[in-house]
Amino acid sequence: MAIIRTAARLGAELFDTADSYGADDKDFGYVEKLLHEALRGGAEGRGGEEEQRGGRQERGGERREACVATKGGMLRVSREANGWRPSRCDREYLLTRMRSSWENLGGRDPVFLWQLHHPNEKESPIEEAMQAAKTAQERGWVRHVGLCNVTLDQLKRARRVVEVAAVQCELNYWTRKAEKQGILDYCRDNGIAFIAFGALGGLKHLASSFPALKYMADRKGFSCEATALASMRHLWPHLIHIPGARTEEHVQDIARGREVRFTAAELDELRRMKPSR
Ligand SMILES: NC(=O)c1ccc[n+]([C@@H]2O[C@H](COP(=O)([O-])OP(=O)(O)OC[C@H]3O[C@@H](n4cnc5c(N)ncnc54)[C@H](OP(=O)(O)O)[C@@H]3O)[C@@H](O)[C@H]2O)c1
């Protein structure tokens, strides 16, 4: 909770979660409830004024509340990385999940952004999932609709059913599938936010994979991670980051990274770099 509040105070505007983030399939909604409590001051009102401000930040004199994005459709069987099951994307199941997410996030305002976690077209066409999301919008549970892990074709088909506000795919210096498949450009050209997950490569190690990035970061006096995030924002200005950080130190480091500046030649070098291992 303290780390979530620190991130909000330092300017994080979007917190990304999923109904399935938690220990296992009995823990659905755990992180949604935690985020709601951290950002809004807690169900028991135990925060007092200082805690109530947890989810707000000052930007140029303007006070803004941090938004929560969540996802639904993925199933979980254990804590293990391979404990995920193919998602359920049928209308009935998704409507139940969207209603639960809305309740977990306060049950008053619609969920700021609800995303389909992973299409599973062997079982249900993406159109069915999007029809469900549209119904959830009409019922006031969801404000904006997004999609994760989609192909360009699935994105185009989804947009015929509902307005798609955001697409979330993996994008980092190792994996640029979303760029190669044209999803990044398509989002930019159609006013759709592109949310990059795994921007730091998850458990991979930036400094040892990209010596040029490490050298540049050292010269500028920032960490490799902060430099990587900042450079990606310069390379793709419509990109939104959701770096995963579990320590105050990492959150502060990421926030400080907003100050990193690049020359055009440096950005070009980063755009072309390949992992050394
Ligand atoms: N849509 C999807 O299917 C999907 C899939 C995966 C992830 N996601 C979303 O994307 C988010 C981020 O993804 P991710 O956590 O897998 O990958 P990530 O952001 O690429 O990497 C997270 C790792 O980077 C470390 N880190 C963060 N800040 C750092 C810093 N300043 N210096 C050094 N290390 C730092 C973290 O360490 P600590 O934990 O120790 O701070 C953690 O090990 C998730 O939380 C989730 O919301 C979505």
Image (spheres, rainbow, N blue to C red):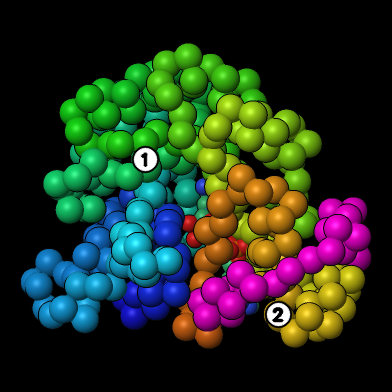
Residue at 84 percent across and 75 percent down: it is 216
Q: Nearer the viewer, residue 255 or 107?
A: 255
Please tell me whether mark 2 sits on a helix, a strand or a loop: loop
Q: Where's residue 48, x and y in %? A: 13, 80
Q: Is residue 159 shown left or right of residue 138?
A: right
Does the residue tagged 2 have its C-beta within 8 Å of any atom of ligand 1?
yes
Q: Where's residue 10, x and y in %? A: 44, 74
Q: Nearer the viewer, mark 1 or mark 2?
A: 2
Q: Name the residue at the left extreme.
A: 44
Residue at 30 percent across and 36 percent down: it is 143
Instruction: Please rate how many residues cluster around mark 1, counting C-alpha atoms within 10 Å: few if below 14, some from 14 to 19, many from 20.
Output: many
Please tell me whether mark 1 sits on a helix, a strand or a loop: strand
Residue 35 occupies quadrant: bottom left
Of mark 1 and mark 2, the one earlier in the sequence is 1
* Numbered badge on residue 114: 1
Q: Are marks 1 and 2 in contact (CB under 8 Å)?
A: no
Residue at 70 percent across and 80 percent down: it is 223
* Kind of residue indicated by mark 2: Ser
Q: Where's residue 156, x and y in %? A: 57, 20
Does the segment drawn in magenta span residue 264? yes
Quadrant location, the C terminus: bottom right
For the question of whether residue 92 can be seen, the reply is no
Image height of 86 relative to 213, above or below: above
Q: Is residue 277 shown left or right of residue 160?
A: right
Residue at 54 percent across and 40 percent down: it is 193
The stretch of residues the image draws in magenta is: 250-277
What residue does disc 2 label? 223
Q: How many marks?
A: 2
Does the segment drawn in magenta span residue 21? no
Quadrant location, the N terminus: bottom left
For the question of whether residue 231 can be seen, the reply is yes
* Kind of residue indicated by mark 1: Trp
